[in-house]
Amino acid sequence: MERNNGRKKFYQKKWFLWIWLVIFPPVGIALLWTLHRSVEKRAKIILSVIFTCWFFIALADDGSDHSNEKEDQTGIVAQAGADATKAGTDKDKGKSLEKKESTDESGKSDKQEDVGQGDKTPEKDKKLKKKKVKRKKSKQEKEDLLKNEIREAIIDVVGEDSLDTFNYVPDKKFSLIKFKGKASFTHNLTVKAMYSNMFNILKAIQSKINTNVDFNVMYPMKDIYGKVSEEKVIAATFTYDTIQKINFENAIYDNIPYMADEWWNHQNVTITE
């Protein structure tokens, strides 16, 4: 009975001890063992075990809460980091877009400049072509003028009716003079007249010609059957250097075959003594 009464008194009068045991078990347990000597030892042990377990459970709950809080904080930090990363990415994207726009504008500007240059290029090409055409035309005009002068000099020697062909190709350093020989009183005079025409032609064009000169002298020839046809009776070549070397004031036309760089004549066209 005394034991039960002690417990009843403990539970009724020692209410503050319960507050300590519930709120902060270590203090309550210490008070239980020091101040309340009337409580049975067995009851103290049971209460100490119960509230010690309660204390550790409370600590575990606090740790869980802190863990959750820490997780929440970690989540907040992670979210903040993600937001910062996203902001940085958006910023980089913005820079990339600005750079791309700048590049596009630069490329567009270059393209426009190229187009502008392209517009100018045809004009420049046209001018160059005009200059080339003008030079070519000018050169051709000079060549045509010189050709006419040489032709007139040849005609003055042999006559326009006797000049068969005159080809003038300065780029290839080539000229061809083809004329007709005329018959004279004798065979020798006819051949000498051919020599004289070649000599006088070279003399007339010496200061004008800038090419080599080939001669073809045509003359009517009769075969054994009495058929007459105009044939080449003399073919000769005089180089430009040879023409410039001849001193026509002292030279003799009879020596024209020996002045030529190349010479050929028909067997019937020879001077007989």
Image: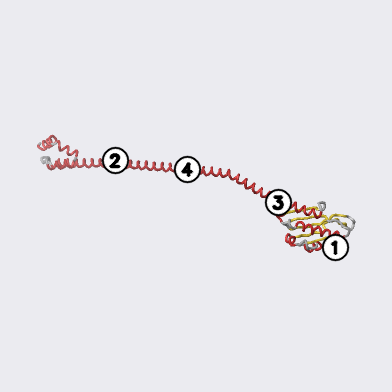
Name the element at disc 4: helix
Instruction: Tell me which label, 2 or 1, sits earlier in the chain.
Output: 2
Residue 239 x %, y %: 74, 60
* Residue 46 in sight in this render: no
N-terminal of the pair, mark 4 or mark 2, is 2
Q: Is residue 165 above or below residue 63?
A: below
Residue kind at label 3, given as amino acid type: Lys
Q: Which mark is residue 69?
A: 2
Residue 102 numbered mark, or none: 4
Q: Which mark is residue 142?
A: 3
Mark 2 → mark 1, Cα distance in angstroms: 138 Å
What residue occupies the far left of the structure in this picture?
Answer: 2
- Marks 2 and 3: CB-CB under 8 Å? no
**Residue shown at 82%/61% (left/top)?**
265
Nearer to us: label 4 or label 2? 4
Query: Quick check: marks 1 and 3 in contact, CB under 8 Å?
Result: no
Label 3: few (<14), some (14–19) or many (≥20) C-alpha neighbours in 10 Å: few
Residue 30 appearing in the image? yes
